[in-house]
Amino acid sequence: MWVCSTLWRVRTPARQWRGLLPASGCHGPAASSYSASAEPARVRALVYGHHGDPAKVVELKNLELAAVGGSDVRVKMLAAPINPSDINMIQGNYGLLPELPAVGGNEGVAQVVAVGSNVTGLKPGDWVIPANAGLGTWRTEAVFSEEALIQVPSDIPLQSAATLGVNPCTAYRMLMDFEQLQPGDSVIQNASNSGVGQAVIQIAAALGLRTINVVRDRPDIQKLSDRLKSLGAEHVITEEELRRPEMKNSFKDMPQPRLALNCVGGKSSTELLRQLAACSFLRISNFEAFGCPSGRRITVQTSSRS
């Protein structure tokens, strides 16, 4: 789901909400140099003052855009997705919680409109994404510090730019940090049609890795399989198919997986473990397990945010 264009279609009474990070817009002013004489701008943002059900606590507010300081960058948001982590943050059960009141949204892409006199790494017209979570991207415009933003190419698809910061980075780190994989090695994962799963497929293909991708069965399974294979998936199978003893014969043309990526848990993760080569890594959502299937030995340790 995408936020930015929606903000421009919704009309609400003009009400100020002070104490928030400043905001900016999808169809804001043309890129230009910063002018201290510019009139204060009003922008729209999705704000929550306390934690709870997003449908009840998030409100569309009109905010006053802060002035641009020497190290600040004014941006207009081009696109901002809604991720499960955004909802968890509003509910108050995420690992990172901003000070309240806060603007929702952890991810998105914006275009630089103006920069302060001390800004050297960005210029009007550049595309940027948040450097860290919690910046608050569900707004039309904003003023952020230069350090809070990362420049990205402006010639990539808009939706790709808006979703660079979470799923692709997670997928890359999981592929690189737990096993020294080489071209030709194989990886198995469940929930392969998720955002992270699709990123794993594409990054693995670019690295020369082969993937076995497990998904839940559905009426349009062939359509889903074709789409994932178009991204670079080698095998796409259902949870039920993976449990069949004869399924191992389908993977004889490739080495046993050295890495398994799991975000489902339960029986699904057990089936992934059974497919692993001896002494390989099973990556399980917020922790990792090192397992040797032949000895059924698993050591679990806490890990960084996935």
Image (cartoon, grey):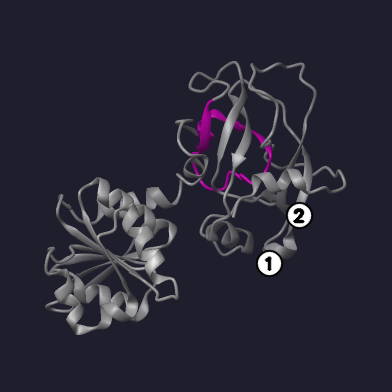
Q: Nearer the viewer, residue 254 or 36?
A: 254
Residue 36 in the image: x percent, y percent?
A: 73, 17
Q: Which mark is residue 249?
A: none
Chain part drawn in magenta? 126-149
Number of callouts = 2
Local SS, label 2: strand
Question: Residue at (27%, 77%) from the top-left corner?
Answer: 242
Q: Is residue 221 visible?
A: yes
Is the Cβ of the residue at disc 2 closer than 8 Å to that at disc 1?
A: no
Instruction: Give residue 19's position: percent from left, percent from top.
Output: 74, 42
Work out how far the residue at label 2 is from the one at label 1, CA to CA, in angstroms: 12 Å
Q: Which residue is mark 2?
A: 59
| Quarter of the figure with the C terminus | bottom left
62 falls in the magenta region: no
* Label 1 neighbour load within 10 Å: few <14, some 14-19, many 20+: few
The local secondary structure at tag 1 comes to loop
Q: Residue at x 57, y 65 (%)?
A: 93
Snapshot quadrant of residue 228: bottom left
Pointer 1 residue: 53
Residue 131 magenta: yes
Query: In the rendered view, would you say 133 is above or below 144?
Result: below
Relative to 117, residue 72 above or below: below
